[in-house]
């Protein structure tokens, strides 16, 4: 086996859309703005798993569109991650949720989201999804 090979870990995420705006959250241990994401759980499709993350991480309930908005990759702890991104059309924003004491949550315009999100590829996905120039 190639010593330089690093396995790819599959994750999924949502672009949370509410009334034409985007809900961003902070990463757990930083002030960087991100979207809800996590590992694809056994027995869940990537879209279903991403919807579960949105509930746990941001208190968001809605309908995930099954068509991907995009995909991006990143490295962390010496591992490679591949993230499938889906639109989540929000029906309900909860006042209390599992990780409310670990993260901030903010409702912003698509243009603000593009400026705030730290990951370049994710910025492009959000920009393309909302046709922000």
Image (spheres, rainbow, N blue to C red):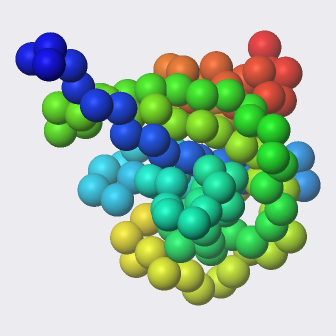
In the image, is 72 to the left or to the right of 86?
Answer: left
Query: From the viewer's perspective, is residue 79 above or below residue 103?
Result: above
Q: Residue furthest front?
A: 1
Quadrant for the C terminus in the image = top right
Q: Residue furthest right?
A: 19
Query: From the viewer's perspective, is residue 18 above or below residue 126?
Result: below
Residue at left offset 24%, top offset 34%: 79
In the image, is 35 to the left or to the right of 48?
Answer: left
Residue at left offset 49%, top offset 62%: 41
Q: Residue furthest left?
A: 3
Q: Quadrant of residue 106?
A: bottom right
**Visible in this render: residue 58?**
no
x and y, in percent, of residue 117 in the image:
53, 35
x and y, in percent, of residue 86 in the image:
71, 43
Query: From the viewer's perspective, is residue 61 above or below residue 67?
Result: below
Residue at left offset 40%, top offset 77%: 101
| Nearer to the camera, 60 or 72 | 72
In the image, is 106 to the left or to the right of 98?
Answer: right
x and y, in percent, of residue 92 in the image:
80, 75
Q: Quadrant of residue 59?
A: bottom right
In the image, is 91 to the left or to the right of 106?
Answer: right
Q: Quadrant of residue 127?
A: top right
Residue at left offset 74%, top offset 35%: 68
Query: From the viewer's perspective, is residue 94 above or below residue 60?
Result: below
């Amino acid at each position: 086996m190639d010593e330089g090979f690093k396995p790819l870990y599959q994750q999924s995420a949502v672009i949370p859309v509410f009334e034409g705006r985007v809900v961003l959250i902070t990463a757990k241990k930083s002030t960087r703005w991100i979207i809800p994401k996590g590992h694809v759980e056994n027995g869940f499709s990537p879209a279903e798993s991403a919807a579960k993350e949105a509930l746990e991480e941001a208190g968001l309930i809605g309908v995930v569109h099954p068509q991907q908005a995009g995909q991006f990759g990143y490295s962390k702890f010496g591992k490679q991650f591949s993230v499938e991104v889906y639109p989540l059309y929000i029906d309900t924003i909860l006042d209390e949720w599992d990780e409310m004491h670990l993260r901030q949550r903010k409702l912003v315009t698509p243009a603000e989201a593009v400026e705030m999100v730290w990951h370049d590829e994710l910025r492009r996905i959000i920009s393309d999804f909302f046709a922000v120039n």
